[in-house]
Image (spheres, helix red, strand yellow):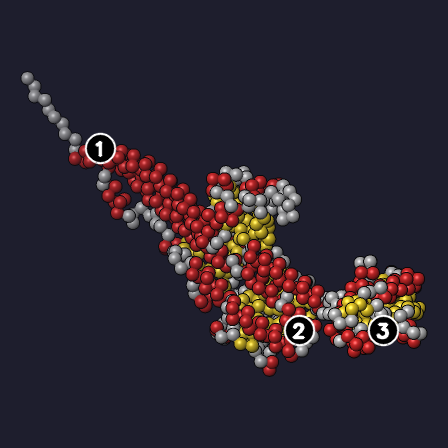
Amino acid sequence: MKSIQLHRLPPRAVALQFLLLCIPGILIVTLVAAGSVRLDAATRTMRLEAREAARAELAAKFIGHDFATVTSDLRVLSEDPDLISYLESESEANKGRLAHDFLIFSREKKLYDQIRFIAADGREVVRVNFNRGAPAIVPDAELQDKSGRYYFRDTFRLSRGRVFVSPLDLNIEHERLEIPHKPTIRFGIPVFDRHGSRKGIVVLNYFGAELLRDFRSALETGEGRGMLLNRDGYWLSSPDAKDEWGFMFGNGRTFGKDFPAEWRVISSNARGSLLTANGVFTFATVYPLRAGHYSSDGSPRPGGQSSREVGQDEYQWKIVLHVGKASLPSSGLLDRPLVATLFLSALLVVVVGSGYIAYARVAKRQGQRALVDSEGRLRELAAALGEGVLVFDLEKRVTYVNPEAQALLGRSEQELLGSRGHTLFHRRRADGTPYPEEKCRILGVIRSGVAYRAAEESFWRKDGTPLPVSVSSSPIVRDGQVTGAVVAFHDITARKRAEDALRKANRQLKRLSRSDGLTGIANRRYFDEYLVRELRSAARDGHPFAVVMIDVDHFKAYNDRYGHQAGDECLKQIAAAMQAHLNRPSDLLARYGGEEFVAVLPDTLPEGALHIAEGLRMAVVDLHIAHAESGISRYVTVSVGVGVTTACGGHTAESIVAAADEALYEAKEEGRNRTQSKLV
């Protein structure tokens, strides 16, 4: 029997065969490991971007929050009764009261480095400095000429009610940068006298340092270096202080020069995140201007002027968070112990492959959850600021509502989620008229991709009452596509009540400034103003015009007989009787002084003017004036003079009043209690 000969392969062949058998497993394991590392790095980068986006949005909220408050404060100061009094009479007493008002305002608000009234020639008239918490009125000798500063000229030329907002820059005092440097935003509004003449501006120097401190505090936690850039890419805030305010010092270095490729993307988009060779850059854009605001490009030079207007969308700051390449999650294959272990674990190929599939699924869910968590954090931050927040999808349905929005609208989360929010609470305008959804500018951002902001809009609560709000609506953009909109709104009921109260007080003040304190009819000052205005209109149109002068006969004797209190009562009843006789809205009765009255009769021919004047006289004759001591007096009469022209043109207020006065004198000379007229 032949023995069986066993042939052994050479050691090299065995090794080669073993290697050939292992190579596929090793390759599979290697690919799995590499994929795991890359996926892990991508997921962590995604989470990093989400966290940085939340920080950027929070910082943007801090920056944009106070502009409406400052504007409201500025309007209140511009309508201060003591300022109005000073514009009418530039006395030292009125000036002192105005300065005191500014001082109290500075002490209470603690938001403004300077509060000033600057006259039409550019000279400071009243100024209060905050002085690091010890506000003080600046002495006259230290007041400055600001006629050469751009913010004075840019504010002074605005129309009534518009507000100038300067760029954020460093304050200049006595034609040089103030040391230590003081970041400042100047809010200015022009003021006018009762004739509509520009008399100057009110300026608030808002603490830019406070705004920047809020910005930095919002970015205290996180990995990225927080920067605030102006629209030209200059640093307003930087982790490296020497980068800041380059445009004020003639330094040409900008973020755009350091990172040109990144700046092209950041400057042309409102928000986003990009990964480049320099790391991750997350950015958001702040548009602080509101409706009615105006701005310019300003000037860093003490006497420099702005060169052009800057619109709401152009007045912007960029918040940029930068995480350097070295700080990003690594995707290298050899720098993780797990990879080396896997190379030696070819026998676990199947297990690792299955694990990879499970891991990939979990990682994908975690990445998606990171984005959702980031959005959740943004919503929580908005709620913490006391604003209502709603998120809409492409179908304009509500997908998220925060507790503040529920409270403001008086609706539960269940009522709002999934609803067409416009139909539910924005279907009507402030006056109650229908507001179609297709015309809704708040939800129009989903179509246009352009943010919308309004200082005042009207929402409607569940109980049917209106809710005045300020609104900011921004599109939600993912992967370059608009996927919805986020709407933040703030209840401005208190502000509107304050504004309404101020308007009511101003109307009352205006009425009092025009009225005679005793009789309630127009006073001499308003008569002068009305006469000039109506006479100018009559001259332009070639219409007739008349002025009637009325004097109470023997009024001194009346006062001596019945006393001054009875005399005052007599004048009030005479005024009421004559006022009741004037039926046309254009006719004006005023107290001229003492016991004299005057009436303006626009567009009245001589015959008609004489008829009206005689009616005024008879209205007084028919009076029954009661007195406690003497019973009824039937003997109050007036003398009346009428100055009249058939067609105005070349006649002055003085000439027509003089004619009426001359006619009145003739009526008195002829025995009183009669009416005389004189043609001008």
Residue shown at the point (58%, 44%) measured from the top left: 464
Q: Amino acid at mark 1?
A: Gln
Q: Residue extending furthest top?
A: 1
* Quarter assignment of residue 73: bottom right
Residue 172 visible in rendering: no
Residue identified by numbered label 1: 17
Q: Is residue 356 left or right of residue 568?
A: left
Residue 86: assigned label: 2
Cα distance in 3D space between marks 1 and 3:
137 Å
Are the residues at dot 1 and dot 2 in contact (C-beta closer than 8 Å)? no
**What is the x, y in percent for residue 231?**
55, 59
Depth check, front residue: 171 or 21? 171
Give the amino acid at mark 2.
Tyr
Q: Nearer the viewer, mark 3 or mark 2?
A: 3
Q: Which residue is mark 3?
A: 553
State the quadrant of the N terminus: top left
Which badge, 1 or 2, comes first in the chain's sequence?
Answer: 1
Foreground mark, 1 or 3?
A: 3
Residue reaching furthest to the left: 1
Q: Position of residue 74 (x, y in %)?
A: 59, 65
- At x 60% / y 82%, what residue is drawn? 141
Which amino acid does the dot numbered 3 rest on?
A: Asp
Q: Is residue 426 visible?
A: yes
